Image: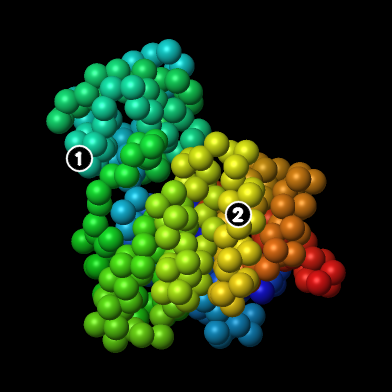
Amino acid sequence: MDYYATLGDPCARREVLDGLFQAGMTGIRVNLSHTSLDKCGAILERMYWPAACQAGREQAHLILDLQGPELRVGELPRAIALRAGGDLLLGDGGIPVPQAILQAACPGQQISIDDGALLLEIRRSSPTVLLCRVVRGGPLRSKKSLSLLGTEVDTPTLTPDDLDNLAKAGRFGVTHILQPFVRDRRDVDILRRTLDGLGLPQVKIMAKIEEDRGYGNLDEIIAAADQVCIARGDLGNSMPLWKLPGIQKDIARRCRAAGRGFCLVTQLLWSMEQRPVPTRAEVSDIYNGVLDGASSLMLTGETAAGRFPVQAMDYLVKTAGEALRTI
């Protein structure tokens, strides 16, 4: 069983990295939707790998989570408070969003932001700007995920930034690539050829299932990837949330049948971003995920932005260990 943290300010210190390894961490994720490999280079070279060696984990994993075809809000000078019932402009003169969203959107459609925390309804659309009504408000921040509900937006498999980061992956000791929003086998094959061309055939591909299209092509994705990642954040945006547990169970079942490992991620210990102790529901979720056959578990905001990163890893490892003893 592998246990992954996500790199962020709280765990970008040597003593915290040491604590994470002591708690049982076996690898760390770098989310390239919010940074670049160059920006993280000093932390990886001067702190992460030395901490791994000191902990006796020279074979620790370093996972790059690419931008891929995921859509995100652009850079904002500061967080913006959105109030339910208010209007919001996306595009020219308003909040920067990808051109693909502006081209695909129509009045009456809804836009989910930040894994569903914010919800907009499009009132008017043009090729350059969308006028939206805020259905579900809250703070809007830079680089948050963006989804046009019910519509497939055409985007490339790898962005120019992805290609730049992949070209440097070997230098920093990258072992795994988290490929976001995998739609079909073709996406995995494109990444595989890119890695081979860079002389990195040993790097493992973890295909993230995050939308209906990927789930619909799950069997061919399982066959093409080294691992599957059940990424419940955006996957939960693509369907009513009460359907998500059944989908998670089905993906797990089909991975087991194919002999393919899978990683479970998103809100495993979400409450521990602010609290030193998890909820009973969270530890039950982890326990059941392990019983369903997860080969790895990944913390995201708990270590990237949370107040208790080491405690979160400790609960993750101990809960999974209890489940493994049951098995």
Query: In which quadrant of the rendered view does residue 176 lie?
Result: bottom left
Q: What residue type is labelled 1?
A: Gln
Q: Find disc 2 in the rendering and name its residue.
A: 248
Residue 286 drawn above or below residue 296: above
Left or right, residue 286 beside residue 156:
right
Q: Is mark 2 on a helix, strand or loop?
A: helix
Q: What residue do we see at 41% from left, 85% from top?
A: 202
> How many marks can you see?
2
Determine the residue located farthest toward the top in the rendered image. Answer: 85
The residue carrying pointer 1 sits among few (fewer than 14), some (14 to 19) or many (20 or more) residues within 10 Å by Cα, namely few
Which mark is nearer the camera, 1 or 2? 2
Cα–Cα gap, marks 1 and 2 = 32 Å
Determine the residue located farthest toward the right in the rendered image. Answer: 326
Residue 4 locus on image (x, y percent): 58, 66
Residue 99 locus on image (x, y percent): 20, 40
Q: What residue do we see at 53% from left, 43% from top?
A: 236
Left or right, residue 61 beside residue 77:
right
Q: Residue 99 carries which label?
A: 1
Residue 204 locus on image (x, y percent): 44, 77
Query: In which quadrant of the rendered view does residue 76 lie?
Result: top left
Q: Residue 282 carries which label?
A: none
The residue carrying pointer 2 sits among few (fewer than 14), some (14 to 19) or many (20 or more) residues within 10 Å by Cα, namely some
Left or right, residue 160 beside residue 214:
left
Q: Earlier in the sequence, mark 1 or mark 2?
A: 1
Q: Which amino acid does label 2 sit on?
A: Gln
Q: What residue do we see at 39% from left, 36% from top?
A: 149
